[in-house]
Structures are given as structure tokens and as C-alpha cells.
């Protein structure tokens, strides 16, 4: 019975997916499938919250571990699923015939993410990675403009498959050194293999698939194209839950390597990750400066924020892991706010220019406020979580004496200030191009979700202690995983 309870969030997700699959066959409307998915997501949220204090292994020892870290991530994934579904069950940018399947693929991807954060064995980790990724490939292709959706999905999938192949190849190196696919066995062999360059080369390849999902250099090229061409609500899911899952897995790997990455060949991996971080934030911010498409701009912004996160993770320290977990939760809320604005303002548009924000502050004061809080957070301005979150990220690098890296990151934040403030200027200082443009209608559920996100962004920025302690508890649980 205890094992069943430990796997309860995933079980509820699978049962909800089965129900959503069967409802259209039984003749139910897509609205019924959408409502069922929201109900299942709320049940998953309750189950994940109820199991926060539990620890154990529901399956064979060593392949799947449940603790505060994994369950806290599942709380976020369940909330992310519900928040995205609250944006609407009939998203116009998704072809109408796919509306019943839309929540199904979101559920499958969420199941993969939940398994990803509990997996403690290489093959389980890889299967969970693919399970979380393939539904997203399908969702991106569901754009009502078939050509646009197919092109975006093809680019996303092909690059993802290359990164996935690199990951499984890297895992074969790790297996060769440890003679086991269990992370605990690999950790036990680390003192013996830490001076082997080939081991760290295999580890770098293993990280490729996760760096791809995070949109970090050199695996960031998919982000602007996919963000631009995918349906709005699908991009919202990719920009929120998917990023949290990736950071969580990277935190697990970093914790595994933390005691053995100092000096010798382990330092090469840290140097490579630092280079990827600095390149991602620099390329992302500079490319975003010239973008006229809003979602494409946000795609490059995602690459830049991946660089900020990697600045902390490459420190291979408890502070770095805690900072990354804290920041990615704030990034989740900030991104959701901005994409809520995109989904609402451009509900009937497939391509969203920055000019779509013109006069937003007068046309819809609430949407203008959401954009303001979300953009201030992404910029890193107080009193939002973006400011204190970056402070924590940079502190992890400074703890390692990497002052130059932090200076480059800070300069990148200044560069980002320009294109983020362009969005605020467009919303508050530029009148609408269309004189007939009126007030923007707001859906009650989506409005409630956005209001909650606003509270989280400001709360984390002004009183971060509770969230910081939760992130620290998750990092400590991760460090104690066998």
C-alpha cells in the first residue's frame, strides 16, 4: 500500500490520461476532456502535496526514488498542467480537430516529467526524458497553420533526436566505467574514475539532452523557431513545466558529481558548462535585441535565462543547486505571466508581433499589470523574484571566485533591459495601430491563474525566505538520495 501511495501522483496522471483518451471515443465533447484533465491535474496536485514528507522506493531498489525533492517538483508539474489548461480548452491556434487530444498529450508529457525527477537509474532516466519530450513534438505540430506547425515541429524534433542520441551515447560511457546503470553505483565508483578524461567526456554527452531541453548553447537553436511557430498554450507549457523538469534533473546530476569535480579532468566539465552558460546568455540577449516577433524574442530570452541558471549549476555546490531550484520556480511564474498576455492578446493570431502589445495598458489594465510584473521579473528588477533570484545565482558563482563570469552575466542583464523595456514602452506609451481596437476580454479561470502568478512573483521577490527554505530542503533531500 505504501508503494502505491508513493506512486499516486503518476498513477492519477495516467488514469486521467486514460479517461481523456476514452471520452472522445464515447462521444463526449472536447470540453469534457478538458474539464476532466483539469480535475485530474488538481487531484495530482493534492496527491503530490500529501506525499511531500514521504520517502521510499515504490519499485525495485535503486531505479525510482521518492523524497521531498521529487514530490516538490511534482507539485510544480501538477500546478503547471492546471495553469496551462486554465488558459482555455479550445485554443484557436491549435487545429480544431485536435482539441480533444490536446490535454491528453499535456498529461503524457507531465507523466514523463514526474518520472524524470524520481528516476535514479540511467535507462529509467532516458525513458522518462523521451516520454516527456515526444508529446511536446506532437503538440508543436498541432498548429492550425499546418505548414508552420510542421516546420517548427520538425526542427524541434530533429534537434531533440540528435541531443537524445548524444545522451544515450554518453550513458554508454558511464555504464562502461561503472558496470552499472544505477546512479548510486556510478557515484560509488566516482573516486576511482574521477581522473579519467573519458568519464567526464561521457558525462558531458549525457548532459546534452538536458541542455537541449533547457535551450542552452549549443542546443538553443530550436527555441526561437519553436516558440514562434508552436501554438501559444503549447509554448507556455514548454516555457514553464519543461524548464523546471530539466533544471531538476541537472540538479540531481550536479549533486552526484559535486564532491569529485574539483581539479583534474572534472574541472574541464565545469569549464565547458561555464562557457555554455556565458555563450547562451550573450547570444540569447544580443539576438533578442533585433526581434520583432514577440514569441521569437521570448525564445531567445529563454536561452539567456538558461545561461543564468547554468552559471549557478556549474559551481557544483549546494548553494548553486539551491539557487537554481529557487530561481526556476520564479522563472516558471514570470514566464507564465508573459505567455498569459500572449495567449490573451493574440488569441486569434498565429504570429505575434511586438505591435500586438500597443496600448495594452489602456485596453486592459490587468493585462498591462501582468506584463509589467512578468517583464520586470525577467529583467531582474526589484521587487520581483527576478532580482533576488539572480542575486542568489550569481552568489553561487562568486563563492567559486568566478568574478569575471558574474560580471559578464551582469552586463548581459543590462543588455536585456533594453528589449524588455521595449515591451513595456509598447504597452504603455504606444497607441494601438488599429483605432477600432477595444478592451481585451479576459477568461475567468485564466485571470485567476495570472493573478496567482503575480502574487508569487512579487512574494518571492519581497519575502523569499519560505521559498528559499523549501528549495534548500529539496536540495538537501537530493544530496541524501542513495
Image: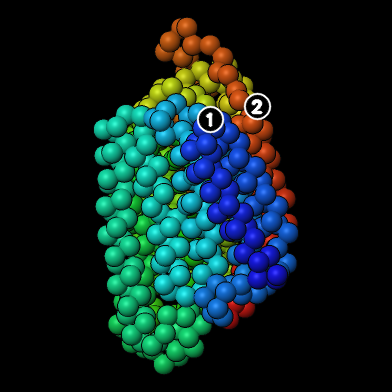
* Residue 192: percent from left, percent from top: 41, 92
Res. 156 in view: yes
Q: Residues within 10 Å of mark 1 (few under 14, many from 20)?
A: few
User: Could you say which quadrant of the image residue 310 lies in?
Assistant: bottom left
User: Could you say which quadrant of the image residue 422 lies in?
Assistant: top left
Q: Residue drawn at (32%, 73%), measured in percent from left and top?
A: 170
**Nearer-the-camera pick, 229 or 204:** 229
Residue at the disc numbered 1: 29
Q: In the rendered view, tell whether residue 311 sits above or below residue 89.
A: below
Q: Judging from the image, what secondary structure is the residue with disc 2 in?
A: helix
Say which of marks 2 and 1 sits in front.
1
Disc number placed over residue 444 in the picture, else none: 2
**Nearer-the-camera pick, 110 or 424:** 110
Q: Judging from the image, what secondary structure is the residue with disc 1 in?
A: loop
- Label 2 with label 1: CB-CB less than 8 Å: no
- N-term mark: 2 or 1: 1
Q: Residues within 10 Å of mark 2 (few under 14, many from 20)?
A: few
Question: In the visual, does 356 lie left or right of 360?
Answer: left
Looking at the rendering, in which quadrant would you find the C terminus?
Answer: bottom right
* Residue 116: percent from left, percent from top: 50, 63
**Nearer-the-camera pick, 453 or 70:** 70
* Residue 442: percent from left, percent from top: 60, 23
Question: In the visual, does 272 lie left or right of 305?
Answer: left
Q: Residue drawn at (32%, 80%), measured in percent from left and top?
A: 173
* Residue 104: percent from left, percent from top: 49, 44
Q: Residue drawn at (56%, 80%), measured in percent from left and top?
A: 61
Q: CA distance from mark 2 to mark 1?
A: 21 Å
**Nearer-the-camera pick, 395 or 477:** 477
Looking at the rendering, in which quadrant would you find the N terminus?
Answer: bottom right
Res. 285 in view: no
Amino acid at each position: 500500500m505504501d508503494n502505491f501511495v508513493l506512486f499516486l501522483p503518476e498513477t492519477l496522471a495516467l488514469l486521467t490520461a486514460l479517461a481523456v483518451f476514452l471520452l472522445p471515443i464515447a462521444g463526449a465533447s472536447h470540453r469534457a476532456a478538458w474539464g476532466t484533465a483539469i480535475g485530474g491535474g488538481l487531484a495530482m496536485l493534492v496527491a503530490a502535496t500529501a506525499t511531500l514528507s514521504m520517502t521510499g522506493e515504490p519499485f525495485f531498489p535503486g531505479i525510482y526514488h521518492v523524497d521531498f525533492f521529487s514530490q516538490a517538483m511534482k507539485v510544480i508539474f501538477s500546478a503547471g498542467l492546471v495553469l496551462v489548461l486554465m488558459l482555455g480548452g479550445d485554443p484557436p491556434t491549435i487545429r480544431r480537430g485536435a482539441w480533444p487530444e490536446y490535454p491528453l498529450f499535456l498529461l503524457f508529457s507531465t507523466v514523463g516529467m514526474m518520472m524524470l525527477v524520481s528516476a535514479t537509474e540511467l535507462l529509467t532516466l532516458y525513458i522518462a526524458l523521451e516520454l516527456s519530450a515526444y508529446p511536446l513534438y506532437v503538440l508543436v505540430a498541432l498548429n492550425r497553420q499546418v505548414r508552420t506547425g510542421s516546420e517548427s515541429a520538425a526542427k524541434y524534433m530533429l534537434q531533440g533526436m540528435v541531443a537524445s542520441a548524444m545522451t544515450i551515447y554518453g550513458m554508454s560511457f558511464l555504464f562502461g566505467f561503472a558496470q552499472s546503470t544505477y546512479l548510486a553505483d556510478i557515484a560509488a565508483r566516482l573516486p576511482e574514475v574521477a581522473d579519467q578524461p573519458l568519464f567526464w567526456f561521457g558525462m558531458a554527452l549525457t548532459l546534452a539532452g538536458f541542455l537541449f531541453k533547457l535551450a542552452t548553447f549549443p542546443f538553443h537553436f530550436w527555441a526561437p523557431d519553436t516558440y514562434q511557430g508552436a501554438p501559444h498554450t503549447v509554448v507556455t507549457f514548454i516555457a514553464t513545466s519543461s524548464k523546471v523538469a530539466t533544471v531538476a534533473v541537472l540538479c540531481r546530476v550536479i549533486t552526484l558529481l559535486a564532491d569529485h569535480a574539483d581539479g583534474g579532468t572534472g574541472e574541464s566539465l565545469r569549464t565547458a558548462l561555464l562557457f555554455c552558460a556565458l555563450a547562451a546568455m550573450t547570444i540569447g540577449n544580443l539576438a533578442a535585441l533585433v526581434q520583432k516577433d514577440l514569441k521569437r524574442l521570448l525564445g531567445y530570452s529563454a536561452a539567456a535565462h538558461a545561461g543564468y541558471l547554468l552559471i549557478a549549476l556549474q559551481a557544483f555546490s549546494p548553494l548553486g543547486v539551491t539557487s537554481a531550484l529557487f530561481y526556476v520556480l520564479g522563472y516558471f511564474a514570470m514566464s507564465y505571466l508573459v505567455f498569459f498576455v500572449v495567449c490573451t492578446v493574440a488569441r486569434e493570431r498565429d504570429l505575434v508581433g511586438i505591435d500586438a502589445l500597443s496600448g495594452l495598458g489602456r485596453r486592459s489594465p490587468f493585462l498591462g499589470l501582468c506584463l509589467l510584473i512578468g517583464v520586470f521579473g525577467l529583467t531582474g528588477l526589484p521587487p520581483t523574484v527576478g532580482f533576488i533570484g539572480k542575486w542568489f545565482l550569481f552568489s553561487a558563482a562568486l563563492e567559486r571566485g568566478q568574478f569575471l563570469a558574474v560580471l559578464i552575466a551582469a552586463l548581459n542583464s543590462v543588455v536585456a533591459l533594453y528589449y524588455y523595456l521595449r515591451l513595456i514602452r509598447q504597452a504603455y506609451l504606444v497607441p494601438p495601430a488599429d483605432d477600432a481596437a477595444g478592451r481585451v476580454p479576459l477568461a475567468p479561470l485564466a485571470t485567476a491563474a495570472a493573478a496567482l502568478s503575480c502574487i508569487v512573483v512579487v512574494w518571492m521577490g519581497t519575502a523569499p525566505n519560505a521559498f528559499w527554505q523549501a528549495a534548500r530542503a529539496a536540495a538537501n533531500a537530493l544530496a541524501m538520495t542513495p
